[in-house]
Image (cartoon, grey):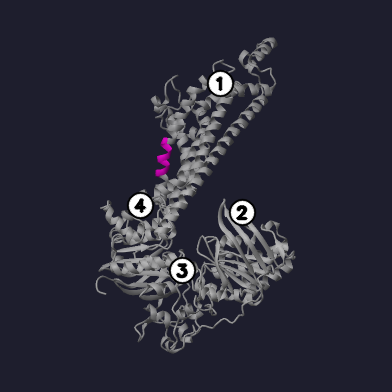
């Protein structure tokens, strides 16, 4: 038996080494894939903005501008160059770390995006911080009362929340808690310039709540299913037969294993939350990258559009990558 | 013999929804230091009984009556809270599959100590002592490991250590060696015997394997349809079975020592809730008389100190045992092994070599057994032969012509002539197609038959494997494991193969069903089919194979005629394999 033990551990070490190498190659490939994805996204945005009706020069100068002044401004902004030239110029800038200036305000894109990005990340971060424990609690509570009233109630409401688009959830919340029914929270999330949203928690309460309901309902359902799965496993039966307390079975034996399945899903939900933020920010007039995106689309401010979309795409990619890696790690453990 | 006793009386476990009994009025007594075997086929209620002895029933089932008294305490009268205090301390459980019963997220140390109640910090020396008692390393590194970092045998030892940690009075073993190789099984059985003796614990050992129970248990109960049908000292029950079911079970078990015909039990075991008036075994019993079908037979004590649930047991005890073994007279196929010739076969998984330079030949009409433990490369070899494994090198000649390695390069006629039967019949038939559709697909593809002809062929092959044509319209989910395996064989036969590759085809089946499948394969050999039979079960090899090759670590370590290899093995590995393989003691007719 001792001999078997050593042999197994040797095999385990070489296997671990091989796994690490394979993992390294996998990570590198995924990184390349991510960069390629972002490149393709940036080309798509470029093409799409060319197809948009309207003209930046006219937006800036107004309807009264003469054709000569419009043409001069276009030359000044580099809009007279062929499309591929414009794209290469922009790409070169990005690679040097300079995504250019806003066509409309003339301010560097980095300055404009910076503050807004912090605001958006704060909003998404606070939403995730509230959502994760709530979803866990709701999912586990429902699973432990499987088939009972509370569970059925949970399944019904979470399904409704799941199926409702964010702007509807947000609008309902505004009516319920912001204006008509029980106005206790500000219906818009305006921030004094330059101040952190964390200093104004009440004003971001409704946008956070909207995001929490939209993502949390989905996540809690996943937690519930995963927990039920784990609770019907043989090692839980074994734990019961060992005479362990209910609490120990739930928290030490079941939860860590249930979380294994939920964590990758949680990072996907985080990615969806980033996407949902565009709508929610617009709805509550919150000064984040989402509302910035809408403003810059309206004024055809290409460098700003590019920057914001790339940020959203990159965060999508990173969170998806995280989800895959976590799920992969779990597979190897099983 | 004195000391704490286990006493179970009138134990019943019922399906919650219907009230149908899974375990029906079971009573037993067990002295400390003794091992009681519980034998039965799947569905006999033996595992439900095992769990009920810890006061536990699976979801959907309920312990509806009875007492389980351990060390003076009736477990079934305790509250949930009191029961928790007793589990692990007075009664403990060793599961069938430690790989799924140990928590993957917790260290060995945590899982060993957490059952010991408030004093969670069990002294480290005591813990090391415990690990040594079950023959495991006792260093800190080992204690930190997770279950997946251990081999199957080590995991089972951990499960046993977990069970005996608090010195319980009764340990319930639920098929603890079913998934293990014979050598590991032999060591685990030795461990069980020693621990019971040294710690004077009582043990209940549940198994479908009569040879294992004969080896480990002092007394045995045989279960059928939730009831005890025979109970007594193990040696007596196995060598001189009184109940017709026990007799039939023993007649179905192949022997490592000699080749004989296996006698399957006709019909199917009743499902839970299929209550028929009279004896539940009567519909399948060769000795049943009218009286058997009208009244439930009582569990009666015999003069030999045994309990038997059969109204004819006194007559039967005097009858010669039906298990008088009929030797199998099929002449071994002659030939020079050039029907299939494999030369220098090596195979790899992700660069790791799992088969090294395997060469052998198969004569027309011969049955060649490929034997080995898990990890020996035997399944890889059969996957190579059928052309499903990519990473391989070596040459094949089949029926006089060179055969490419990959299935997709082989001609349709070669693919038709070489057919494969998988271990798990549940997974190898398409669940969304009827039996008929499962059977007609290969003939239409490989023989180009039209719909009418292929349906006719399906009927023929189903008839060949003795499955009624009425089942053609059924779906795989509606058939039993034994029926499905026959259908899987029928599907292979539908293509008129010349060589059948059987990969552990009886491993998932009960002994009575295994007997019928082995006999079916034997009759196919009589028809002139050639066969490669991959298995870890040497008794099945003895009962069917003409020649044997023994694989160890991806190499052939021994090959030759079945008789020579199994009776006088020359390689140490084969010798060890034979020593560790348990055989049911031969029955003695009176």
User: Share a chain, discs 2 and 3?
Assistant: yes
Label 3 marks a residue whose chain is: B
Q: Choose the circle earlier in sequence order: 2 or 3.
A: 2
Question: Mark 3 or 1, which is nearer the eye?
Answer: 3
Confirm or deny contact between disc 3 and disc 1 (CB under 8 A). Answer: no
Q: Nearer the viewer, residue B130 or A167?
A: B130
Q: Nearer the viewer, residue B5 or B383?
A: B383
Label 2 element class: loop
> Is residue B372 rendered to the left or right of residue B432?
left
At x 56% / y 74%, what residue is drawn?
B562
In whole angstroms, how far apart are the C-alphas of marks 3 and 1? 73 Å
Mark 2 sits on what residue? B391
Question: Does the magenta portion include A131?
Answer: yes
Question: Mark 2 or 4, which is nearer the eye?
Answer: 2
Label 2 marks a residue whose chain is: B
Confirm or deny contact between disc 2 and disc 1 (CB under 8 A). Answer: no
């Amino acid at each position: 038996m001792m001999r078997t033990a050593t042999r197994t551990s040797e095999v385990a070490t070489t296997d671990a080494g091989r796994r690490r190498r394979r993992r390294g190659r996998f990570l590198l490939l995924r990184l390349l894939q991510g960069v390629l994805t972002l490149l393709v996204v940036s080309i798509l945005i470029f093409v799409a903005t060319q197809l948009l009706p309207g003209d930046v020069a006219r937006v800036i100068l107004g309807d009264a501008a003469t054709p000569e002044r419009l043409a001069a401004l276009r030359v000044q902004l580099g809009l007279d160059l062929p499309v591929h030239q414009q794209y290469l110029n922009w790409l070169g800038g990005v690679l040097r770390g300079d995504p250019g200036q806003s066509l409309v305000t003339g301010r560097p894109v980095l300055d404009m995006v910076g503050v807004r990005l912090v605001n958006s990340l704060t909003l998404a971060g606070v939403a995730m911080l509230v959502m994760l424990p709530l979803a866990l609690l709701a999912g586990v509570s429902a699973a432990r009362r499987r088939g009972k009233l509370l569970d059925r109630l949970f399944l019904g409401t979470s399904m409704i929340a799941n199926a409702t688009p964010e702007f509807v959830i947000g609008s309902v919340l505004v009516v319920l808690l912001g204006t008509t029914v029980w106005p206790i929270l500000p219906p818009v999330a305006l921030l004094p310039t330059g101040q952190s949203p964390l200093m104004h928690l009440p004003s971001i309460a409704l946008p956070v709540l909207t995001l929490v309901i939209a993502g949390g309902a989905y996540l809690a359902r996943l937690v519930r299913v995963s927990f039920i799965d784990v609770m019907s496993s043989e090692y839980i039966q074994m734990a019961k037969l060992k005479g362990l307390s209910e609490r120990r079975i739930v928290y030490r034996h079941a939860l860590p294993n249930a979380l294994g399945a939920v964590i990758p899903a949680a990072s996907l939900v985080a990615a969806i939350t980033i996407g949902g933020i565009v709508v929610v920010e617009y709805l509550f007039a919150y000064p984040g990258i989402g509302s910035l995106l809408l403003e810059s689309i309206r004024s055809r401010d290409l460098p700003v559009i590019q920057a914001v979309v790339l940020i959203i795409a990159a965060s999508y990619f990173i969170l998806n990558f995280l989800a895959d890696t976590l799920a992969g790690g779990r597979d190897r453990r099983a | 013999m004195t000391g704490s006793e286990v006493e179970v009386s009138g134990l019943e476990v019922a399906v919650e929804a219907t009230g149908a009994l899974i375990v029906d009025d079971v009573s037993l007594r067990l002295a400390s230091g003794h091992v009681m075997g519980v034998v039965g086929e799947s569905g006999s209620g033996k595992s439900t009984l095992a769990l009920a002895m810890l006061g536990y029933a699976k979801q959907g089932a309920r312990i509806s009556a009875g007492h389980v008294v351990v060390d003076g305490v009736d477990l079934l009268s305790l509250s949930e809270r009191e029961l928790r205090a007793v589990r692990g301390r007075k009664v403990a459980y060793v599961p069938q599959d430690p790989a799924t019963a140990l928590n993957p997220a917790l260290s060995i140390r945590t899982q060993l100590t957490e059952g010991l109640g408030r004093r969670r910090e069990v002294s480290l020396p005591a813990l090391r002592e415990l690990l040594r008692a079950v023959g495991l390393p006792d260093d800190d590194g080992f204690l930190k490991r997770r279950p997946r970092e251990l081999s199957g045998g080590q995991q089972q030892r951990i499960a046993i250590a977990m069970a005996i940690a608090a010195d319980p009075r009764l340990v319930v073993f639920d098929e603890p060696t079913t998934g293990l190789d014979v050598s590991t099984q032999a060591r685990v059985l030795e461990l069980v015997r020693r621990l019971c003796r040294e710690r004077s614990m009582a043990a209940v050992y549940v198994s479908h394997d009569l040879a294992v129970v004969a080896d480990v248990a002092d007394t045995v109960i045989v279960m059928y349809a939730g009831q005890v049908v025979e109970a007594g000292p193990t040696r007596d029950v196995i060598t001189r079975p009184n109940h017709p079911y026990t007799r039939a079970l023993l007649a179905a078990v192949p022997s490592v020592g000699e080749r004989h015909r296996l006698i399957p039990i006709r019909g199917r075991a009743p499902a839970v809730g299929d209550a028929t008036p009279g004896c539940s075994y009567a519909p399948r019993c060769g000795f049943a008389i009218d009286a058997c079908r009208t009244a439930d037979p009582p569990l009666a004590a015999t003069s030999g100190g045994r309990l038997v649930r059969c109204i004819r047991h006194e007559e039967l005890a005097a009858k010669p045992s039906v298990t008088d073994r009929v030797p199998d007279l099929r002449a071994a196929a002659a030939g020079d092994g050039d029907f299939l010739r494999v030369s220098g076969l090596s195979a790899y998984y992700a660069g790791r070599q799992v088969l090294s330079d395997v060469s052998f030949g198969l004569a027309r009409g011969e049955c060649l057994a490929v034997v080995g433990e898990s990890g020996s490369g035997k399944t890889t070899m059969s996957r190579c032969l059928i052309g499903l494994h990519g990473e391989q090198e070596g040459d094949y000649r089949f029926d006089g012509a060179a055969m490419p390695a990959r299935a997709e390069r082989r001609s349709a006629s070669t693919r038709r002539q070489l057919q494969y039967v998988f271990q798990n019949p549940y997974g190898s038939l398409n669940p969304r197609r009827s039996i008929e559709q499962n059977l007609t697909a290969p003939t239409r593809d490989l023989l180009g038959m039209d719909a009418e002809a292929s349906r006719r062929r399906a009927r023929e092959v189903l008839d060949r494997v003795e499955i009624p044509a009425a089942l053609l319209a059924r779906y795989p989910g509606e058939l039993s494991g034994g029926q499905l395996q026959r259908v899987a064989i029928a599907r292979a036969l539908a293509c008129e193969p010349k060589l059948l590759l059987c990969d552990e085809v009886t491993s998932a089946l009960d002994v009575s069903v295994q007997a019928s499948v082995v006999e079916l394969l034997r009759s196919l050999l009589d028809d002139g089919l050639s066969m490669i039979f991959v298995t870890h079960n040497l008794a099945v090899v003895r009962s069917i194979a003409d020649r044997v090759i023994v694989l160890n670590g991806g190499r052939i370590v021994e090959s030759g005629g079945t008789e020579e290899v199994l009776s006088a093995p020359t390689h140490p590995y084969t010798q060890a394999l034979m020593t560790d393989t348990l055989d049911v003691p031969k029955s003695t007719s009176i």
